[in-house]
Amino acid sequence: MSCTSNLKGTVNKKPSHPVLLVQDNKGKRIIHLDQNIYSLGRESGNSIVIYSKLVSRRHATLLRVTNPGLKNAYSFQILDGDLQGKLSTNGLIINKKQCFSKELQPGDKIYFGGDAIVIYLMIDSDKSESEILELDQSDDLFTLSTLTFDPNDTLVTDNTYNQPLSESALIRLASFPELIPIPIIEINLFGEITYLNPAAFLQFPELQATPENHPFLAGIVSTIENKKKKFFVQEVEVDNLFFEASIYYIIESGLIRIYLIDITQRKQAEKELKRSHQELEIKVEQRTAQLKQSLANLEAEMAERLQAEALIRYQVLHDLLTGLPNRTMFNEHLTTAINYAKQNGSMLAVMFINLDRFKTINETLGHAVGDQLLQSISDRLTRCLRLGDPLARWGGDEFTVLLPHIHSVKDAIKVAQRIMNALKPAFYLQINETSTLTPPLHISTSIGIATYPQDGEDAQTLLINAGAALYSAKANGRNNYQFYLPEMNSQASSLLNLERLLHQAIEREEFIIYYQPQVNIKTGKITGMEALVRWQQPELGLVPPEQFIPIAEENGLIVNISEWVLRNACAQNKAWQDAGFSGLRMGINLSPRQFQEPHLVQLVADILAETGLAPEFLELEITESTVMQNVEFAKTMLHILEEMGVHISMDDFGTGYSSLSYLKKFPFHTLKIDQSFVRELKDNLQDMAIISAIIALGRSLNLRIIAEGVETNEQLELLRRLDCEQIQGYFFSRPLTVENATKFMQEYWAQSWNGVTTQ
């Protein structure tokens, strides 16, 4: 079967040009052929896209072939696959005959499976596209009949190619490689060069002189004959240039065609990439070693910090003598239990336990025996309680118990009786470091009980009422338990009276400020003052802050009191600086209620502007619990104050959460070690460990450390040994009125300072 068209030709006298009529899944369209080369396939990157799943990605190549015998005459040669020799999957079918290549004649039909056909036509130049598309109405051009052909037929071109070709035909067939800018070589099976395109001739003129030894041709014929390969690719190096040779054996003509692509730049790039990769590997190895060492150092540092944080966290939440939770942790448990009880409508109880006559034993037999007794009592209480009933040492000889799951007061009575029975057997304790035991010690206990929700719906109320019940038990002869009753709060009327007088105190300006110096024990300089508010009530005298501050915090009066303190303390510091006491920083406590005020920042800015005090000479002190009430709000507020230049101090550090995480989040300048750790510094190694850890932590975070409550020379020397630079306490000076504080500084500044001395 021939690839020749069966369409009757028509002689066109008018000028004509070639077109392709395409019908596929997208419909019918016309392609005017005015370029030298076209690629046909289903990929969008082809010159002509055939929309059919049966079409290969690069199905065929269309080349314009110049006819050397006629002026401006040309035709189109179609090839199966692409110019690199990669054939299509389903083959090239022209006029129902499978072919490898063919010079197209008008009317040739190119089939792409059962749903796509392309027809080659020569059309008069004056015909419109609509007239061209109407051709199929009469000539049935686009009939897609079932194709019948033998798939094993030899891939040959038109039958005319089986006859000897004229010189004109050979020139015309060879014209399409002439257009390609890459070198093309053709040889026969004897290794003789039969054709060089212009690109090959210009770039490799030596090929004609010594073809048999040239690297491009070496071994090609034997590879095709021995390995039966029709197509393969190999790399060839010639004069330090690298080429990718695509070699295709054309069975029809018995020729071997070689396409050469210069890949020198790619090879150089690969070489450079390899060199860069090797250099990068060396750098990566070096950097990896550095990172490993840095990581090891960081892990070691983090391990130390985590240990320090874990130690501080444990010591903050536990009683160091008994190992029991302290009041901070107990409050957390209680708050959680109350929330659970609210959600589930259940009942809970809080117990305050006080050891009767413990003070007598402690004073008679010494603190060492007293500590042993507290430890032994803790063990007995732990064993007699149910699993899940938190026990805490509240302080001194007081313990608290939380019963989170009870059904009635009878459950609480049973636990109270078990506690009292557990403490009845005598205690035998060791005296000092000898093996001598104390005489049998008998201890009784008084217990106060408050229940939720009957006696209070929040932690503070329950604890207050349980404490009131405890005092009632003591008043009733000790060694018993009492449930809270409303009449136990006989102090309620006095508290109301105190609150009434507190309102009047603001109007009558009965508040005064005392100032307590802070000193650097290395330089001997007074570095600051802490402003402490006092209430001079005409009828009650000097009311301690622990009596009126909680009331003011609860009813909101603390906001006005704090503003008064802030304004007057800043004004006083400015006056002292104007008097020559330069560099003095004023520490002022911010109450939790005042810290939550939305206009606090503006208030501070206004007072600083009003008094003329520079921001760096104001230090606002806040407690850990204040910060933790609303972490995000506190973070924002403190950063704004810090940006103003105001210093921020963490007060009573070690008594609250003591978390390293918030120390990193918040812009603190100073940590103040709570006086509870300093008070027992002489006899308590745990307190020394805590203070040492806090000092180390503060230094690592570049914070100033002040130890509060320093009252003895022995405490001072221990703090000096622990490398604590600044102190505050009675040993150096009690809180002073403004007149006495001014006089104190005048005398102190006049002295030659050689170290801290008792004042």
Image (cartoon, rainbow, N blue to C red):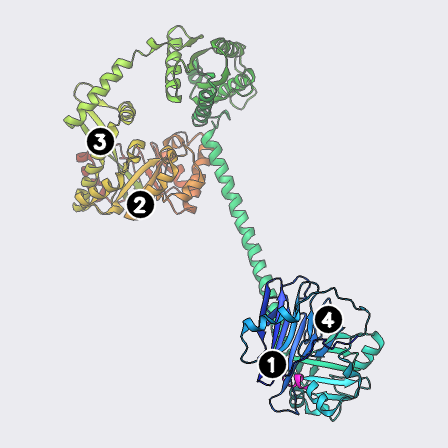
Image-based side of 221 in relation to 652, left or right? right
7 or 89: nearer the eye?
Answer: 7
Mark drawn on residue 263: none
1 and 3 marks in contact (CB < 8 Å): no
Distance of mark 4 from mark 1, alpha carbons?
22 Å
Residue count near mark 2 (Cα–Cα under 10 Å), binned few <14, some 14–19, many ≥20: some
Q: Position of residue 36 (x, y in %)?
A: 60, 81
Distance of mark 1 from mark 2, alpha carbons?
73 Å
Q: Quadrant of residue 428?
A: top right
Of the residues shown, which amino acid type is indicated by label 2?
A: Ile
Query: Which secondary structure, mark 2?
Result: helix
The residue at which mark 1 appears reads as: 36
Residue 444 visible: yes
Residue count near mark 4 (Cα–Cα under 10 Å), binned few <14, some 14–19, many ≥20: many
Q: Residue furthest front?
A: 138
Vertical relation: 41 (above or below) 165:
above
Q: Earlier in the sequence, mark 2 or mark 3?
A: 3
Query: Which secondary structure, mark 1?
Result: loop
Mark drawn on residue 560: 3
The residue at which mark 2 appears reads as: 640
The residue at which mark 4 appears reads as: 93
**Which segment did they paint magenta?**
174-181
1 and 2 marks in contact (CB < 8 Å): no
In the rendered structure, does residue 112 fall within the stretch colored magenta? no
Of the residues shown, which amino acid type is indicated by label 4?
A: Ile
Of the residues shown, which amino acid type is indicated by label 1?
A: Asn
Q: Is most of the magenta stretch helix, strand or loop?
A: helix
